[in-house]
Image (cartoon, grey):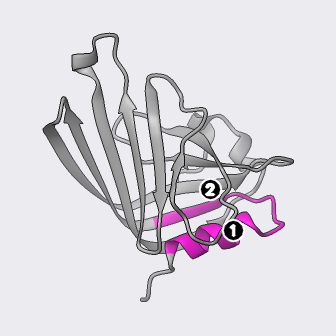
Amino acid sequence: MPSHPISSTFTNFLHQTSPAPLQITFATLEIHNSQNGQFLNHVCRPQSRLILKKIPCSDLAELTVLDNLVFRFSFQFRMPQTKEFHTIEMLSLPRPLDHGKLLVDEEKIMLSFRIDAPDPSLRVEVTHTYQGICDLKELSPLLSRKPVGQQDNG
């Protein structure tokens, strides 16, 4: 089955008029963690999901990471004005996450962020790389407003 081009899928969704969030299922998610430049671990997960939604009356969109190692989280980013994606700053990251960047191209989505700590030597750098769109599903706009514990997991 041919995969959907990722940046085109993002761009097309963000410029349509539907308010419904889009759940994207990827063939693979690779998570790399490092601390002080030293490799900590690598995890590979199949069938990982992200939820993409537009923020009404703004130039912002929100991405919800459903399959993180520790907890689900969401962040906002400015919608790109061009079809080509570049590195975009993550806005409104929940603590203790910070210094987030989003890279979207035709073959992958890469999220990189830091788990902050009071002691700088304990900070952890995390990179999520999603590849191969397997499924696209529009969700109910009401579903996306439920607390994390009540969201549909399927």
Look at 59% across and 73% down and name the residue there.
9
Q: Quadrant of residue 146?
A: top right
Instruction: Name which residue type carries label 2.
Output: Leu
Q: Position of residue 96 (x, y in %)?
A: 44, 22
- Tell me the quadrant of the picture where the N terminus can be found: bottom left
Q: Considering only vertical position in the picture, is 97 above or below 145?
A: above
Which quadrant of the view contains residue 126?
A: top left
Q: Image check: 43 left or right of 79? A: left
**Left or right of 131 in this view: 61:** right
Magenta segment range?
Answer: 6-25
Q: Are marks 1 and 2 in contact (CB under 8 Å)?
A: yes
**Of 64 and 107, which appears nearest the observer?**
107
Residue identifier under label 1: 13
Q: Outermost residue toward the right?
A: 57
x, y percent for residue 33: 24, 40
User: Mark 1: which amino acid?
Assistant: Phe
Q: Quadrant of residue 147?
A: top right
Is 17 contained in the magenta span? yes
Residue at figure coordinates x 28%, y 17% from the top left = 120
Task: Tell me: 27 left or right of 14.
Answer: left
The image position of residue 105, as x and y in percent, is 47, 68
- Residue visible at 69% across and 68% down in the picture: 13
Per the image, label 2 sits on a secondary structure element best described as strand
The residue at 61%/67% (across/down) is: 10
Q: Which residue is mark 2?
A: 52
Q: Position of residue 116 (x, y in %)?
A: 37, 22
Q: Residue furthest top?
A: 118
